[in-house]
Amino acid sequence: MVSPRPIRTVRYTSHFERAYARLPLDLRRVAEERLNWFKQNAFDARLRTHKLRGPHEGYWSFSLTRKHRVLFRFLSSDSVLFFDVGDHRVYRS
């Protein structure tokens, strides 16, 4: 499913939407910029996109800041579902 093609569809879980709304305004602004990069190229080096292992097998993550991440899954080569956003606690099961 890894593809250099642009991401055309981004879906959000209700959990993601609640977590995003709780982020400070300055971090939401950073997130919007990173989302634009992500839509153009999900593997832009600035995002540090990587596949997760262990209990999060099948999930991916990209960085908003050194501390904050977006947890997502590819639905197809050009479609993703965002599950969570926040600090490293997004990796807790």
Image: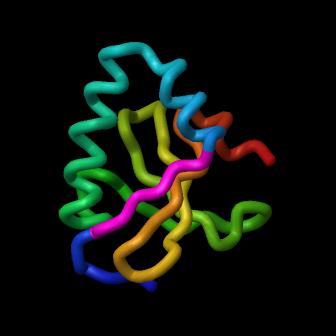
**85, 50: nearer the viewer:** 85
State the image coordinates of residue 82 (x, y, percent, origin top left).
52, 53
Magenta residues, start to end: 7-13
79 versus 14 height, above or below: below
Image quarter of residue 40: bottom left
Image quarter of residue 92: top right
Q: Residue at x 52, y 75 (%)?
A: 75
State the image coordinates of residue 76 (x, y, percent, origin top left).
46, 80
* Horizontal arrangement in the rendering, residue 52 relative to residue 57 (left or right): left
47 versus 5 height, above or below: above
Q: Residue at x 47, y 31 (%)?
A: 67
Q: Residue at x 21, y 53 (%)?
A: 37
State the image coordinates of residue 55 (x, y, percent, origin top left).
78, 62
**48, 30: nearer the viewer:** 30
84 versus 56 height, above or below: above
Quarter placement of the N terminus: bottom left
State the image coordinates of residue 26 (x, y, percent, origin top left).
30, 16
43 versus 88 height, above or below: below
* The stretch drawn in magenta includes residue 66: no
